[in-house]
Amino acid sequence: MLLFVLGVLVIAAGLALSIALHEVGHLVPAKLFGVRVTQYMIGFGPTVLSRTRGETEYGLKAIPLGGYIRMIGMYPPHRGEPEGTIREDSTGLLQQVTELSEDAKAYDSSQYGPEDAGRTFVALSVPRKLVVMLGGPSMNLLISLLLMVVLVCGIGLPAVTPTVQSVSECVVPADAPADVSCEGRPPAPALAAGIEPGDTLEVIDGHQIEEWADVTEAVRASGGESVEIVLERDGEILTVQATPILDERPVLDEDGAAVRDPNGELVTEEVGFLGVAGTPDLVPQSPAVVPEMAWDAFVRTGQIVLTLPVRLWEVGEAAFGTAERDPEGPIGVVGVSRLAGEVAAADEPGFALREKAGTMISMLASLNMALFVFNLVPLLPLDGGHVAGALLEGARRRIARLRGRGDPGPVDTSRMLPVTYAVAAAFLVMTVLLLYADIVAPISLFP
């Protein structure tokens, strides 16, 4: 139970830090560009702790979900309002959800005067608006990438190492069941050569062995030939002779997986067979694999966001019906916390501290990628909504210049309040649904 709670606390702290840094991504460029930032808060609801530094109040809210910075003049004045009227708003989705009333905005705006007109968000150029609003999601992307580097280079990725885990007793067909008898079958070449579990293969027929793919390539190319194998056993270097037997074995793809035909049958070829299995382990990799990993994570997350209504419907079927919960589907804060607790408390074979740390890092990297992608959705009150408004403003001004017309002014994104209300309501429904589903139909790593 203590380990379970520790896992929950670790993921909660990591998520809170990610949210805090997301808002730092908005805060720093806003201040650099001279925008007056009145609040930097983590959470929403009543303020629990705060301290004012300069013109900005920094603090913690009662409900530690989300965060925001409050900038003056995020919206231009309404038509008919006095020039220099300042309308205030914040960057946090949850904060905006709880402060959508015009009365609340009007009260806050009444605290500022025309002298602050040059320090508003709306007064920024389009490129600077984009920098401020993309600063938050970009911070989450950066966090995700850094965590992936730690995972890949420090913890390692699952791979098969050249250390022998097991040695076959005999040569059996590639599609034979695991419990097939060795009676009447030839002994495996590795067994005949004296190779033992725990040996690390160093050289096969003059080919240096760095990874398991090197073993497969060298052995398959040596069918029917006597080859010299250099191995390490208990710190001692030994040399043995083995003759890989020519046998029908599965054709392997680029990832080392067996190839099957359209009917599901193994595709085989006659190659060398030694009869050893490598040891699965976490193997540090080059940071060069991170871009591909990040792209795959981005694409998977984007697919989830694009199909979110369908996936939420499936979550509802699992929560209120008998359907199975999709382990690759959306998950709420409760579900993430539960998974983190399971990881920390797991007592599964081969799932030691290193594997647990890698899983937790992978979860936080995925969460930050999700925050990055989700905040790019071009709808208010998400950051992407303000980005879309800035891009529209830039397009309008360019078209006006080409037509020889005057500056049309900034885009009033507050006109999209009906859409904002709908998005906010949908978000609240999604949050409640995922909360309920995570309780009654939770996703588990160890079913």
Image: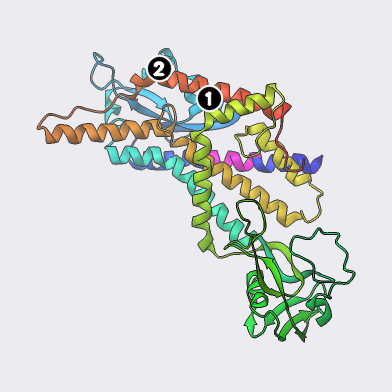
- Is 10 situated above or below 41? below
Regarding residue 50, the answer to whether it shows in the image is no
* Occupied quadrant, residue 164: bottom right
Q: CA distance from mark 1 to mark 2?
A: 14 Å
Query: Image quadrant of residue 37?
Result: top left
Mark 2 residue type:
Pro
Q: Circle 1 — which element?
A: helix
Magenta segment main secondary structure = helix
236 to the left or right of 203: right
Magenta-highlighted residues:
12-19
Q: Residue furthest left?
A: 404
Q: Which mark is residue 418?
A: 2
Q: Nearer the viewer, residue 315 or 170?
A: 170
Q: Of the numbered discs in the image, which one, if any, rests on residue 427?
A: 1
Q: Residue at x 71, y 54 (%)?
A: 355
Image-based side of 228 in relation to 365, left or right: right
Residue 167 in the image, given as x and y percentages of width and height: 81, 71
Give amino acid for label 1: Phe
Quadrant where the C terminus lies?
top right
Q: Residue at x 62, y 24 (%)?
A: 433
Residue density around tag 1, few if under 14, some if 14–19, many if 20 or more, within 10 Å: some
Residue 260 tag number:
none
